[in-house]
Image: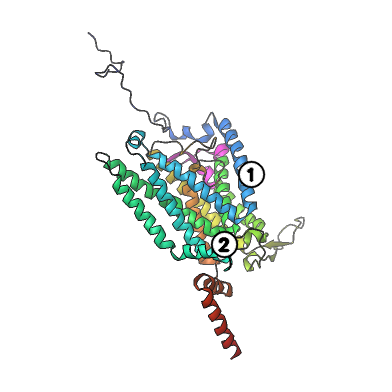
Amino acid sequence: MQKDHGSTPATPTGRLRHRRRSTEVLPDVGKENGSHLLVNDQNKYRSMLTRIYSSIWMIGGFVLIIYLGHLYIWAMVVVIQIFMARELFSLLRKSHEDRQLPGFRQMNWHFFFTAVLFVYGRFLNQQLVNTVTSGQPLYQLVSTFIKYHMVTCYFLYIAGFMWFILTLKKKMYKYQFGQYAWTHMILIVVFTQSSFTVANIFEGIFWFLLPASLIVINDCAAYFFGFFFGRTPLIKLSPKKTWEGFIGASVTTIISAFVLANVLGRYEWLTCPRKDLSTGWLHCDPGPLFKPEYFTLPAWIPKWFPWREVQILPVQWHAMWLGLFASIIAPFGGFFASGFKRAFKIKDFGDSIPGHGGITDRMDCQCCAKFSLFVQMVMAVFAYIYHQSFIAPQSLSVDRILDQIMMNLTFEEQQALFMKLGQIIKA
């Protein structure tokens, strides 16, 4: 009997065996790389409208949270972290193995909330003490927690470690140790960038909002320049990225950084650092970076130009460095995310946001192209390092000394210091 090469061989049980299909959208190897460019995508207008509608809701919610202030922005970061962790925990989950390990999935969340307590407990050590007074019961609770913060987090982690060892099951070792390592990798990725992000928030909303906005601007500009002018492929890892989109986005981002810093830098509630966890509008001396300087335009400027003098904030020159970094370096975080998704054969980390993917795909509230949390991680770290290296005062100030006294001395020690200073001044 002639063998039918077009049929699928049957298994001994009589069932057809099908090869498991990947969820990754692989490029067609039979076409040239240029055919995958966004300018040649037949469904690009439908995809663009879906993303625009979702972006309006995201941007509206983001603006509202920014308006509410530091504490609400911090809360937004924590909520986003929880959704990110859920999506990443699910990435390597296998339902068959999980059914044989009851309670194993809860251990991931134990490590997650231990990391939350460790990272933000240290931050509360610096911020919360200034919010409460010594006469309140909350102060005693906070003081006790701060004193034993490190040891509490350490033993919580040790408890999770022992939990993991006790749950080890024969023939499941490889899966369990793989999940253990994956959990720790997720915690590093999620909390590294977020700790820098929260630090930027309390240095002034300006230092959180400007870098995040530049990523959004670069993202959208790259999408639209690639949408209308893209012809030359940029990198094989992301076939729809083009040199036209990259260059157009870079110029747009640097110019936008210069202009946007002038707009944001005029509001004290955006530029003032938050010293405690209280709510409300802030008023402070904005400092020399946010005080306008006036420059006379050269004589060759046409007379019909309406301004003879321009007003520039010194922080605008720093903003251009942030814009340069956002336009040239940060996109490589997106390329890293693309390679990460291809390695796991997925298109998106989730599908909670129409047209964008999951929360992890849109952690930085971007509106157009397919970047992810890795871009915001790179940008948040750079913004913090740049601020601490070139902007934050390096010498001690009265405010910084008072903060150290409030954080590290007991009430009795503060009274003794007060009496000693009084004796020194009188002498």
Give yes or no for residue 26 being in the magenta stretch: no
Q: In the rendered image, which quarter contains the C terminus?
A: bottom right
Cα–Cα span, label 2 and label 1: 24 Å
Position of residue 364 in the picture relative to residue 3 (left or right): right
Residue sitting at the far bottom: 427
In magenta, the rendered stretch is 226-247
Residue sitting at the far left: 1
Q: In what element is the residue under mark 1?
A: helix
Foreground residue among 126 and 27: 126
Residue position for label 2: 203
Q: Residues within 10 Å of mark 1 (few under 14, many from 20)?
A: few
Whole-percent x and y of residue 159?
Answer: 35, 53
Whole-percent x and y of residue 170?
Answer: 24, 40
In the image, residue 239 sits, relative to residue 270, either above or below, namely: above
Identify which residue is drawn at 60% across, 54% down.
257
Number of residue marks: 2
Whole-percent x and y of residue 320?
Answer: 57, 58
Q: In the rendered image, which quarter contains the N terminus?
A: top left
Residue position for label 1: 60
